[in-house]
Amino acid sequence: MAWTLALQEISPPEHPEALSDVKPLLDRLVAAFGPRPLSRLLDVKPGTVGNWMSGHRRLSPEMARRVIDLSHVLSRALQVFKPETAMQWLVGQEPFLDGSRPIDVLAIRGVAPLIEALDGIDAGAYA
């Protein structure tokens, strides 16, 4: 079913900080993986995630983007695959990405190619 909106105008959110705060996404990723595995996925030193969680260090804009992108991709991958398969997909070779590893494509090109690949897989397409 297509998503269509008949809006001509939309007001800005009353509390934009609720949408721009990356901490809830970080909390979800830590809850899912634990701090050390997450630090490997984000390519940061092991103590960094703990420092972010405790508030001893702030996420830089680059790190905030990584958290947002990783959360987005994993959320979509878990809609398409079972958890173990989603993790294998993330570090495996993906035909929709010309045989590249999705985690590498995420780091180099961002989230869009991965979401497109996952949408294709979900639709039953073949690369």
Image (tube, grey):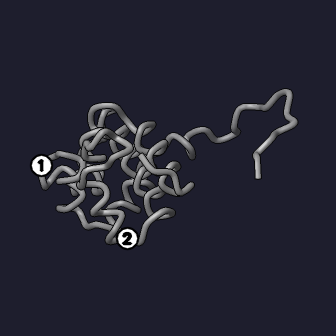
Return the residue nearer the eye: 96 or 63. 96
Q: Amino acid at mark 1?
A: Lys
Q: Secondary structure at mark 2?
A: helix
Q: Which of the two marks, 1 or 2, is nearer to us in this view?
A: 2
Q: Amino acid at mark 2?
A: Pro
Q: Residues within 10 Å of mark 1 (few under 14, many from 20)?
A: few
Residue 64 disc label = none
Q: Residues within 10 Å of mark 2 (few under 14, many from 20)?
A: few
Which residue appears at 69% of the width and 38% of the height? Answer: 13
Return the residue nearer the eye: 60 or 95. 95
Which residue appears at 36% of the width and 40% of the height? Answer: 64
Q: Secondary structure at mark 1?
A: loop
The residue furthest top is 8
**Quadrant in the picture for residue 25:** bottom left
Q: Is residue 75 left or right of residue 32?
A: right
Return the x and y of residue 123 as percentages of the image width and height: 56, 55
Return the x and y of residue 71 as percentages of the image width and height: 41, 52
Return the x and y of residue 46 as percentages of the image width and height: 13, 55
Q: How many marks?
A: 2
Q: Mark 1 and 2 residues: CB-CB less than 8 Å, in contact? A: no
Return the x and y of residue 3 as percentages of the image width and height: 76, 45
Q: Is residue 77 left or right of residue 48?
A: right
Q: CA distance from mark 1 to mark 2?
A: 25 Å
**Quadrant in the picture for residue 47:** bottom left
Q: Does residue 37 lie above or below 5 as drawn? A: below
Which residue appears at 25% of the width and 42% of the height? Answer: 100
Residue 45 disc label = 1
Q: Is residue 124 left or right of residue 51?
A: right
Of the image marks 1 and 2, the number of the one nearer the N terminus: 1
Which residue appears at 28% of the width and 66% of the height? Answer: 33
Residue 83 disc label = 2
